[in-house]
């Protein structure tokens, strides 16, 4: 079998990511530049919303062989999508209040030039994630900084390891045989190899 040179691998990965962006209906692929080097994908260009920016990164993560992504895309809002910070803050608070997974009394919201920042402390990772998901598609949002921390519960490492091993086996998008789990105090460490950045994120989510 002919060995594929690194330059050829980079070109192929670049093309794969470009095609994935073209197949993603929420993304205008013609406005996004893609570079690839040793599994690291660079995304540049202008997008019309934070939601599109997120969708482009998520699409690139799905491609096999992608190890990391550098996101240098800029959100250039159309004039009819521009909102002042007060309107965005009000919309963000409403979105959080309507999301059953978000403990709104534990989260503070700040908005600066269209950029939302969350602060506070919640009990679980899914609550931290839900807060960001709730505001991602709001009109006028240029970005989200999720600074919400998670409380450290008292854990029994052996029980946590068993639970995570089981969760990884249940995850359809993860090959659990290639992932090893270690728990040291309140820290979970995952070792192994996965086929894409998306599979790595799914393993982290399962854990």
Image: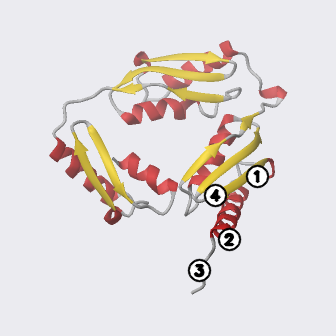
Q: Residue 37: which disc? A: 4
Number of callouts = 4
Pointer 2: what residue? 8
- Residue 3 is marked as 3
Mark 1 vs mark 4, foreground winner is 4
- The residue at 82%/27% (across/down) is 80
Earlier sequence position, callout 4 versus callout 3: 3
Residue at x 64% of width, y 23% of height: 115
From mark 1 to mark 3, how far is it between C-alphas? 31 Å
In the rendered structure, which disc, 2 or 1, sits on the residue that comes first in sequence? 2
Name which quarter of the figure residue 154 lies in.
Answer: top left
**How busy is the neighbourhood of tag 4: few (under 14 within 10 Å), some, or many (20 plus)?**
some
In the drawing, does residue 69 fall left or right of residue 120? right
User: Would you call the spot at circle 2 few (<14 residues within 10 Å), some (14-19), or many (20 or more)?
Assistant: few
Choose mark 2 or mark 1, whichever is in front. 2
Gap in angstroms between the C-alphas marked 4 and 3: 17 Å
Earlier-in-chain disc, 4 versus 2: 2
In this view, the residue farthest toward the right is 79
Query: Left or right: where does residue 145 sit relative to residue 115?
Result: left
Q: Between residues 175 and 179, which one lies in front from this camera angle?
A: 179
Cβ atoms at labels 1 and 3 below 8 Å apart: no
Do callouts 2 and 1 mark residues in contact (Cβ within 8 Å)?
no
The label number, if any, that marks residue 29 in the structure image: 1
């Amino acid at each position: 079998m002919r060995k594929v040179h690194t330059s050829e691998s980079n070109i192929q990965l670049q093309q794969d990511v470009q095609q994935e962006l073209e197949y993603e209906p929420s993304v205008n692929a013609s406005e996004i530049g893609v570079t690839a080097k040793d599994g690291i994908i660079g995304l540049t260009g202008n997008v019309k919303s934070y939601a599109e920016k997120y969708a482009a990164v998520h699409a690139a993560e799905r491609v096999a062989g992608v190890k990391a992504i550098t996101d240098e895309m800029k959100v250039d809002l159309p004039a009819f999508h521009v909102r002042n910070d007060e309107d965005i803050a009000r919309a963000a608070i409403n979105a959080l209040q309507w999301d059953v997974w978000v403990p709104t009394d534990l989260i503070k919201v700040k908005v600066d030039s269209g950029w939302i920042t969350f602060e506070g402390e919640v009990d679980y990772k899914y609550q931290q994630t839900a807060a960001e998901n709730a505001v991602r598609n709001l009109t006028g949002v240029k970005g989200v900084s999720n600074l919400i921390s998670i409380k450290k519960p008292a854990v029994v490492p052996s029980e946590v390891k068993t639970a995570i091993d089981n969760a990884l086996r249940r995850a359809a998008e993860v090959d659990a045989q290639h992932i090893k789990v270690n728990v040291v105090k309140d820290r979970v460490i995952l070792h192994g190899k996965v086929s894409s950045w998306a599979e790595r994120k799914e393993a982290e989510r399962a854990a």
